Amino acid sequence: MPRRRPAAVLIACLPVTACNFDAYGLAATTDVELTASSSSSTGVAPEPGSTGPGSSTGLSEPGTSEGGESSSSSSSGEMACTEDCPPTPVWTVTTPGDAHALVLDEAGDAVIAGERIQTNAPASTDVWVAKFSGKAGQLAWETRHNGHQKGRDFARDVALTADGTVVVAGGSEEVEGRRTDVWVGWLAGDTGELLASSNLMTTDWNGAGVKLDEWAETLAIDDDSGLVVAGTRCAVPCDVPDAWIGRFTAAGAPVWAEPMLACASGSFRGLVLDRESLLPFGTDGYDGSQVPWRSLIRRLDAEGAGTWSALPDPPQAEIGFVVLAGALAPDGGLWVVGSEIVAGTDGGFIRLYRPDDADTPIVELRGGALAGELSAITLTGDGAPIIAGATGRYPGRSLWLGQFTTELAPLWRIDEPSVEVNEARGIARDAEGGLMVLGVQLPPDNGPATTWLRRYSPAGAA
């Protein structure tokens, strides 16, 4: 059995009958399609409350927009947005595959990671990584990894070292007689060649013959190109999983005496680093458990000792909370976004915490105030949040994104058509102030997913 921390550091678990993970997702195997994007962000302010697919809302709260001002009128004669304007789509790439993570390199090129279905084995997937030009969206390279057991292999996060090496983390079926194991790959940034891979010695930690499902959900690179990796693991059959985090050298050797440090039940879905600490986040719930799930946010020092924890959400009947993404503000504040699990409604939240100062958010929007779930966040140079998520129910579910002030007054919102993209998976801001947004189109028949990648120029840019 996996080693566990003393019971005092684990959150009490909810009674369940089973725990069934859905770790993989869907993918496919055809070619990239690159299109010049027609704008679903017109810059024209619609009637109040208009947030349907294809609309963009320049909401009337005052603030500062980084992209400058657009022209004063549109070709249709309507008054155009002149302040706090939404960005403009430049190009869109669609390609078969189920991408889960996005990072930009110094040139503004986009590296995405996820999985694709194997051509001759539709029940199996390969780790899939691809790089696209930030200027025009052309495919620079793509690569796949098929584990030795040729089962379900997948990526959940991607990051870049200081020298441009691409690091990918997820899970793979590599060892005979074992199940899903942690998998990390190092790839050449210019070609996508696999330079090295590792399970971070998880087989050695767990002992011979132990059957576990364990994988990485997130990773970050420290100043020495070392890795901080976090995710979830559970014995088979699974009862209650551990949310774990570990710290490793640039070559993948463990730094801590207990490399897979279990901090709570549930799963870590993301993490950020500041100068002195590690900030993982996720949920203490898990597939198969009863709600309420609660948000899980920790702060650990360089040795893995806990120094701060956000107060979990108070139990609310039939509502669960999952923190999915976060970002550090210039003043050290921690922004987090996520989803509320509420039957029949769309729910999400955005919160700003002050670690070591307060265990509750100092500002927050959630539920109906957002009209959608959130799964990705980036910040402007001034620390204002730009977010992306999903709204609506299938088959009308669609991706949306928007910007707020640091006090969470809304500035603009874009809702992309549901026929193009259903879910947001990542968002990043480039050196020019443009946005790269990663999403997926999930067909209603549970068929292969299509990855959607769009670049937006700053408002007012030529």
Image (spheres, rainbow, N blue to C red):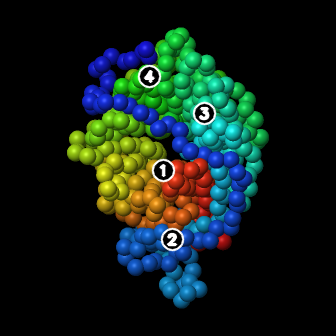
Between the residue at mark 3 and the residue at mark 2, the CA separation in whole angstroms equals: 35 Å
Between the residue at mark 4 and the residue at mark 1, the CA separation in whole angstroms equals: 31 Å
Q: Residues within 10 Å of mark 1 (few under 14, many from 20)?
A: many
Q: Which mark is residue 376?
A: 1
Q: Which residue is mark 4?
A: 236
Q: Which mark is residue 153?
A: 3
Q: Are marks 3 and 2 in contact (CB under 8 Å)?
A: no
Give whichever of discs 4 and 1 has the lower sequence position.
4
- Under mark 1, the amino acid is Ala
Asked which quadrant contains residue 5, the reply is top left
272 on left or right of 451:
left
- Report the front residue among 316 and 90: 316
Q: Secondary structure at mark 4?
A: loop
Q: Are marks 4 and 2 in contact (CB under 8 Å)?
A: no
Q: Which mark is residue 54?
A: 2
Q: Secondary structure at mark 1?
A: strand
Between the residue at mark 2 and the residue at mark 1, the CA separation in whole angstroms equals: 20 Å
Seen at 72% across and 40% down, the residue is 143
Q: Are marks 4 and 1 in contact (CB under 8 Å)?
A: no
Discs 3/2, front: 3
Discs 4/2, front: 4
Work out whether 38 lies above or below 202.
below
Seen at 69% across and 39% down, the residue is 120
- The residue furthest bottom is 77
Discs 3/1, front: 3
Q: Secondary structure at mark 2?
A: loop
